[in-house]
Image (cartoon, rainbow, N blue to C red):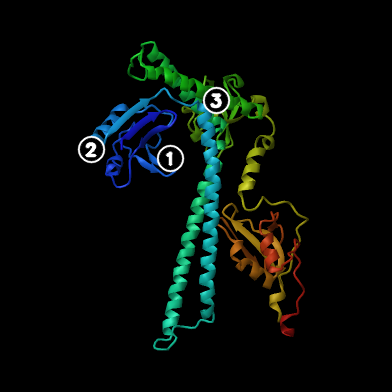
Amino acid sequence: MTIEITHTRREGTLIEGTSRGDGSAEILRLREYGRTQRQPFRWSRNLDCWYLPHSRDHATYPPSLELLAQRLRDAGFETTLTIDNADRRTFAEAEREREEKAEGRAERFGGYAATAARNSEAEWKKSHDISERFAGGQPIITGHHSEGRARRDHARMDDAMRKSIGESDRAEHWTGRAQAAANYEQFKKNPGRTLRRLDRLRADLRAVEKWQRGESAKGYSRNPDDPELTIRHEELTEEIKHWEQVIKDAEAGGVKIWSKADFTRGDFVLYRGSWYEVLRVNPKSVTIPHIHNGIGKLLVRATGNQHDDWTWTAPYDDVSGRKSADEMRQPPQVQTAEHQERAEQSRPIQEAVPTETPAPVTAPADGANRQEGMALVLITSKHSRRSRRCALWAMTRREAQAVCGDARTSGRSYMLTWTDRPGTEGADWEWVPDNGSLDQVLEDLGITPRRNWTAAPQAPAEAA
């Protein structure tokens, strides 16, 4: 049987006519092919033939395929080689197919993730059911007739738990793959990323046009009569037109595309979370004070900074907003409202809200039924000042112990604690808003907290 090596831009590089065990696989798996001369061929069950990865929509490197054909002939195979770089599909067709495949991958990977999650839960339940036998803390009794069964149960528990953890890791892996595939179109059509892609494509197109005129580009020259230049010119023109339409659609949808016409010297530009005064307006960027001046600041002016002699360029595709000098003279709270909102959303608890006039509160007395005395639940976080004690709720000591002991009431940057002797409201502590993130914990524990602090009256210790 003849082995046929074919390459077109439309289908890529394909190898047909091989059979299992004929010796051709050892040659095709060598990492010496493709444009980089470091790629192996792979078998595709869908195509039922060998293919070269990433060879579609690209011109091939003929010496690589000629080397492959010669190796197959030397091994005793009758081999033909056909290269047609002019047979191609439009960029719109290729991109549409890529988006459809991404949707299919998202659905398929989502199914893998769901299956792995079910398997993980089943294995965990299996381990848990076996462990019920040892719920009372029964040890393995050496020499007893139950020793063998107990050791087997322990081994089964360990095996099931390891499988559960492994399936959980698989579920996490496929969930990430599914999310990446689902975000493919959004990622590709991101306006900032698309603008940068257009700059690169236009530079490539200018280089091709120079080569066609017989000029040097990118440090070297090419034969103006090379038909590959004509094909490449058509491809780049189609791709640029496609992404320009993506930008037009984004603008029609309300996305602002910044340019040189939007700025003048003295304006302020929002760049990576801070406002910088514009020192100079360039064709593709604005010159601003160096970003080292913006560390910990929301507003950076042209002078008065630690590094006034340093500058930075902010490309228009990375700009988030613009204000004139007059707008920046408004009260500070207007300037920083956006930053305050973003900062508040990132914190586990918001800033304190003034409450009623502070009043001293007497701490609960030690009594016989101390667990039913009142306690104040406090929240502390890495954003809290040492001198500031933030109160969330008032409840009984028993309830406070249950809430603060629950694993769900502590995270990477915050934790809950309680006290029955908080001191004076306003002086020693203050109320902070409850953002509702722990409502489920309170509901599970059957606790209804209060938002006012009055110590419950208790009998004196002598009466106990």
- Mark 2 and mark 3: Cα distance apart in space: 47 Å
Q: Is residue 318 visible?
A: no
Q: Are marks 2 and 3 in contact (CB under 8 Å)?
A: no
Name the residue beneath numbered marker 1.
47
Q: Earlier in the sequence, mark 2 or mark 3?
A: 2
The residue lying toward the viewer, choosing from 191 and 110, is 110
Callout 2 secondary element: loop
Q: Is residue 439 visible?
A: yes
Q: Are marks 1 and 3 in contact (CB under 8 Å)?
A: no
Disc 2 versus disc 1: nearer the observer? 2
Residue at x-position 77% and y-position 74%: 457
Q: Which mark is residue 242?
A: 3
Amino acid on which disc 2 is placed: Gly
Amino acid on which disc 3 is placed: His
Amino acid on which disc 1 is placed: Leu
Residue 68, picture quadrant: top left
Asked if residue 48 lies left or right of residue 423, the reply is left
Name the residue beneath numbered marker 2.
76
Callout 3 secondary element: helix
Is 463 rendered above or below residue 159? below
Residue at x-position 24% and y-position 34%: 73
Q: Going by the picture, which residue comes out furthest to the bottom? A: 144
Q: Which part of the image, by quadrant, shows the C terminus?
A: bottom right
Residue 78, picture quadrant: top left
